[in-house]
Amino acid sequence: MPTEKSPARPLRADARRNRTAVLRAAQEAFAAEGLAVPLDEIARRAGVGAGTVYRHFPTKEALFEAVVLDQLEQLVEHAKAAGAAADPAEAFYAFLAELVADAHVKKDLADALAGAGVELSAATLAASSTFQRELGLLLTAAQARGAVRADLDQADLHALIMAALAAERHRADPARPGRITAILLTALRPQGA
């Protein structure tokens, strides 16, 4: 076990592949079945032994939080890429549409993590903070282009995203996916735009 003075050794290539496979299998299993899915089932889905899962994640809660952290880190990377786009307005709207479209799984995991009584690690809290900062930068850049209502602040945006996530998740009409997101994105535009 690494100490403060000795950094953790990088994982071997096969260990990295196994860890990635476990995270992907866990994401799918937790999204489909919730926290009740046994670690042995996650190991089976990942194509690894149960010992491999426990070596990387000593508890189910640790694995669950790792899935959430992985998703937050991916969101940060997507937000940074959107922030580097030539058209910040187009990037802002595309990022929000993707976020809400994909987030039914991410939101379920975040809800379950909070409900499971798992304490969030400093790394997860830092990733969440970084994501919020990147989202704020996207908003500011799109507002500077006149593509987003000037009276919208980051707290408003967060609340609207959460509302869209809930609405999309509970929408009874699967024939019209993304409808709530489209309405949200239209509402963000300045009047007359």
Image (cartoon, rainbow, N blue to C red):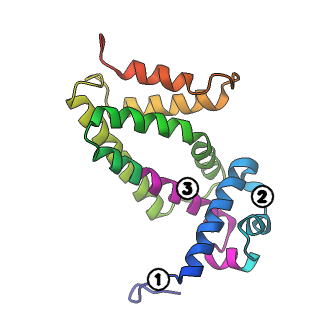
x then y, percent, for residue 166? 59, 31
Callout 1 crowding tier (Cα within 10 Å): few <14, some 14–19, many ≥20: few
Q: State the CA–CA distance, disc 3 to disc 1.
A: 21 Å
Secondary structure under the numbered disc 3 in the rendered image: helix
| Residue drawn at point x = 69 percent, y = 65 percent | 60
Residue 140 visible somewhere in the drawing: no
Q: Is residue 27 left or right of residue 76?
A: right
Kind of residue indicated by mark 2? Val
The residue at which mark 2 appears reads as: 37
Residue 98 is situated, as x and y percent measured from the top left of the image, at 48, 38
Mark 3 lies on residue: 68
Earlier residue among tags 2 and 1: 1
Q: Assess whether mark 1 and mark 2 are in contact (beta carbons under 8 angstroms).
A: no
Q: How many marks?
A: 3
Q: Amino acid at mark 3?
A: Val
Task: Give the number of the disc on residue 10.
Answer: 1
Point out the frontmost of discs 2 and 1: 1
Q: Position of residue 64 (x, y in %)?
A: 63, 60
Q: Which residues are magenta?
A: 52-76
Q: Secondary structure at mark 1?
A: loop
